[in-house]
Image (tube, rainbow, N blue to C red):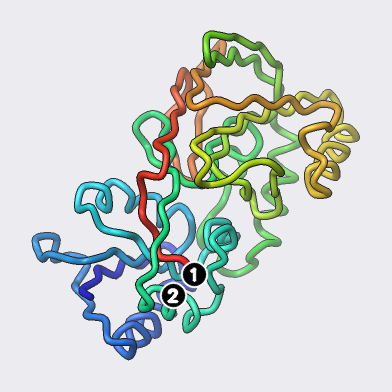
Amino acid sequence: MRVRLVINPLSGRARRSGESVAAQLRGLGLEIVDERARADPVDAIVVAGGDGTFSRQIPEALALEVPIGVVPLGTFNDLARTLRIPLDVEGACAVIAAGATRSIDAAQVNGVYYVTEASIGVSSRVARMQRPQDKQRFGLLAVAASALRAVRSTRPFSAEISYDGRRATCRAIQLTVANSQRFGGFITAGGAAIDDGWLDCYCVQIDSLTKLFSVARAIISGRGRSAAGLRSFRARAFDVRTRRPHRITADGEPAGATPARFQVFPRTLRVFAP
């Protein structure tokens, strides 16, 4: 199998592990094609990095009609955890070499593909605050510090959400449209799946840090949908408008601003998985 290996150039961990990933794949009988050789035919794309690096390869994989493999070297690795892909290089490469694939949903906002979640508000601000050098040096502590700064500086915004001929209005500090049951590093949403053909929109409406922590505890404990201060909606597409443009991140990467349309493409993407 000929694979194009894509390594996140901004991730110190991915750069340091790049040679190890390539060596593992070659040792398992795979042929590595230079990422810059775009004209060379390949049977698959392999991403060594996090969810954002993976999502950037979705258009290419769909165009070439090939599966994507992931060697999880990101901060949260939500996709790998969702698909039960081993978090170590050797185990992840073995899954790719085994050749088994499954089809999952791909989501899109403003023409940008994603697999786990796209957000407006606190988490989007956190993603913009992150500096690669801080994440390399401090890891999750850097993310936590950015989250605290973002919560303090974020102000509620009004959003109009249209879906399935219905309309809802919420005043939120966070609006997330999730494609997966796992996202944000620690959130697991019951009743959702990455291959169910649905998007789940979560709107966090709180007016104090105390309520924010209450919602966070409910989400972590799996009671998110019933938490006071959290509204959820399910549809195949959402149109979101805000009074003024708000920036969006998708799998931690910039994805334009509101107004925006979020939509799902059921089981359109093939991935290597156990």
Corner quadrant of residue 208: top right
Q: Secondary structure under badge 2?
A: helix
Q: Secondary structure under badge 1?
A: loop
State the image coordinates of residue 269 (x, y, percent, origin top left): 36, 49
Farthest-out residue, right: 210
Corner quadrant of residue 15: bottom left
16 or 203, nearer to the observer: 203
**Residue lying at 53% horizontally and 34% vertically, measured from the top left:** 198
Q: In which quarter of the image is the N terminus?
A: bottom left
Q: Is residue 116 above or below residue 86?
A: above
Q: Are marks 2 and 1 in contact (CB under 8 Å)?
A: yes
At label 1, the amino acid type is: Pro
**Residue lying at 56% horizontally and 10% vertically, measured from the top left:** 243
Q: In this view, does 260 lie to the left or right of 86?
A: left
Instruction: Measure how far apart labels 2 and 1 are at the Cα level.
Output: 6 Å
Sequence-earlier tag: 2 or 1: 2
Task: Return the mark for residue 274.
Answer: 1
At label 2, the amino acid type is: Val
Q: Is residue 55 above or below residue 254?
A: below
Circle 2 is placed at which residue position?
Answer: 95
272 or 110, nearer to the observer: 272
